[in-house]
């Protein structure tokens, strides 16, 4: 706890104070650019990975970056998604899994979660992931199997998102986009799912600035 307390004092003196006016403007409201759905894993920091500041990401975090499908009695995840779209006007939703995910490890050995009934209940929202892995990936083992489960789970949760009325409406109107990402803890790389080839590929910066820089550094033919 002492480390956390010291960190708070350091934030107040070296971060907040020099940028006080900016933080006061943030108090007036938020305009995040995306909804980022990530795992609770302490090794995953959405703002650090994306180099975003407070106010730029609206974040949902839970074990396994799970989004339960639409339900007549919606829970916190669905309420947060709905608020992000309807109130904040968010136009991009990212579901981001990560390597060596403990939740996915638990999913692959769900019958062993006798002492964690709440976790076992929660992971039922990833049952489709477990069945896909059982049917398609039994030739894999250990880390490769875990990585496959994590990737498939990202896709399953994207499908769950599509069942939410607010998401379905945004997609039908063409004002909302869904993105599946995979963060590799070991290397810091982020991979994005490409629907055209059905694979996760390294995320590419397609901004005009990055494209221009790549053209300038490209070797002459």
Image (cartoon, rainbow, N blue to C red):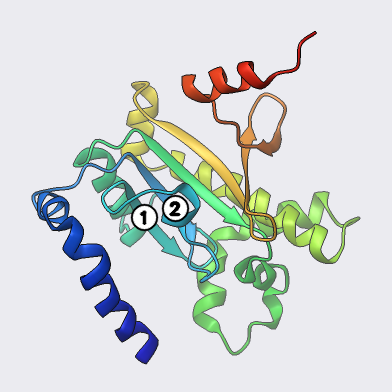
Picture coordinates of residue 124 (x, y %)? 56, 65
Measure the alpha-carbon separation of dots 1 and 2: 6 Å
Residue drawn at x 70%, y 18% as measured from the top left: 218
- Name the residue tied to disc 2: 37
**Relative vertical location of residue 209 with respect to residue 62 in this rendering, above or below:** above
Picture coordinates of residue 5 (x, y %)? 30, 85
In the figure, residue 213 lies in which quadrant? top right
Q: Nearer the viewer, residue 113 or 62?
A: 62
Q: Which mark is residue 41?
A: none
In the image, is 210 to the left or to the right of 20?
right
User: Quick check: can you spot residue 67?
Assistant: no
SS for tag 2? strand
Q: Are marks 1 and 2 in contact (CB under 8 Å)?
A: yes
Residue drawn at x 56%, y 41% as measured from the top left: 180
Picture coordinates of residue 221 (x, y %)? 80, 8
In the image, is 216 to the left or to the right of 143?
left
Q: Nearer the viewer, residue 72 or 213?
A: 213
Residue found farthest to the top: 221
Q: Residues within 10 Å of mark 1 (few under 14, many from 20)?
A: some
Q: Nearer the viewer, residue 115 or 6?
A: 6
Q: Which mark is residue 59?
A: 1
Residue found farthest to the right: 139
Q: Residues within 10 Å of mark 2 (few under 14, many from 20)?
A: many
Figure quadrant of the N terminus: bottom left
**Relative vertical location of residue 144 with respect to residue 210 in this rendering, above or below:** below
Disc with the residue nearer the chain's start (1 vs 2) = 2
């Amino acid at each position: 706890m002492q480390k956390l307390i010291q960190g708070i004092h350091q934030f107040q003196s070296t971060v907040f104070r020099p940028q006080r006016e900016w933080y006061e403007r943030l108090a007036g409201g938020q305009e995040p650019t995306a909804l980022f759905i990530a795992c609770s894993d302490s090794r995953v920091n959405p703002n650090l990975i994306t180099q975003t500041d407070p106010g730029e990401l609206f974040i949902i975090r839970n074990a396994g970056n799970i989004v339960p499908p639409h339900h007549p009695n919606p829970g916190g995840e669905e309420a947060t998604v709905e608020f992000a779209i309807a109130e904040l006007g968010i136009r991009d939703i990212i579901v981001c899994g990560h390597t060596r995910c403990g939740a996915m490890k638990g999913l692959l050995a769900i019958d062993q979660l006798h002492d964690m009934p709440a976790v076992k209940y929660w992971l039922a929202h990833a049952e489709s992931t477990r069945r896909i892995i059982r049917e398609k990936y039994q030739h894999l083992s250990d880390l490769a199997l875990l990585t496959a489960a994590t990737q498939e789970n990202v896709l399953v949760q994207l499908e769950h998102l599509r069942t939410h009325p607010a998401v379905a409406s945004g997609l039908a109107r063409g004002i909302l986009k869904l993105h599946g990402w995979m963060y590799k803890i070991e290397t810091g790389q982020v991979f994005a799912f490409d629907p055209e080839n059905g694979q996760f590929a390294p995320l590419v910066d397609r901004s005009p600035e990055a494209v221009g820089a790549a053209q300038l550094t490209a070797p002459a033919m």
